[in-house]
Image: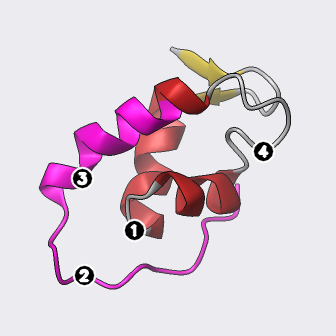
């Protein structure tokens, strides 16, 4: 499903960025650009990030942003 129209990012792209960048909306925004233009997709991005977060380890350090 297309989530970010400005960057043509799907929910799969957002999940991959969340896993690679530490599963917080700001890291995803920096990593793949979702929500960085108009911001209209940020509510959906936040929901997707929350769905990934339970799978992340609480002690895991954020990784470098994902370049897409």
* Quarter where residue 60 is shown: bottom left
Crowding near the residue tagged with mark 2, few <14, some 14–19, many ≥20 C-alpha atoms within 10 Å: few
Compared to 64, does 14 lie above or below? above
User: What is the C-alpha distance between the residues marked 3 and 2?
Assistant: 11 Å
Query: Which mark is on residue 60?
Result: 2
Measured Cα–Cα span from mark 4 to mark 1: 17 Å
Which region is colored magenta? 45-68
Q: Position of residue 16 (x, y in %)?
A: 44, 50
**Whole-Å distance between the Cαs marked 3 and 1?**
8 Å
User: Please, what secondary structure does the residue beneath circle 4 have?
Assistant: loop
Q: Badge 3, how many Cα within 10 Å: few under 14, some, many 20+?
A: some
Q: Quickly name the residue at label 1.
A: 22
Name the residue beneath numbered marker 4. Answer: 36
Label for residue 53? 3
Label 4 neighbour load within 10 Å: few <14, some 14-19, many 20+: some
Q: Is residue 58 magenta?
A: yes
Dot placed on the residue nearer the N-terminal end, 1 or 2: 1
Query: Residue 51: x, y in percent?
Result: 25, 38
Residue at (43, 54) in percent of width and height: 18
Tell me whether circle 4 and circle 3 mark residues in contact (CB < 8 Å): no
Which of the two residues, 35 or 68, is positioned nearer the viewer here? 35
Near-viewer residue (33 or 40): 40
Q: Quadrant of the C terminus?
A: bottom right
- Measured as percent of width and height from the top left, residue 10 is found at 56, 27
C-alpha separation, residue under disc 1 versus residue under disc 2: 8 Å
Judged from the image, the secondary structure of the residue bearing numbered disc 2 is: loop
Residue at disc 3, secondary structure: helix
């Amino acid at each position: 499903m297309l989530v970010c129209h400005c960057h043509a990012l799907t929910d799969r792209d957002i999940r991959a960025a969340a896993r690679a960048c530490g599963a917080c909306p700001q890291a995803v925004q920096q990593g793949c650009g979702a929500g960085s233009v108009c911001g209209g997709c940020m509510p959906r991005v936040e929901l997707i990030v929350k769905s990934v977060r339970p799978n992340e380890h609480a002690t895991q350090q954020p990784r470098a942003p994902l370049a897409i």
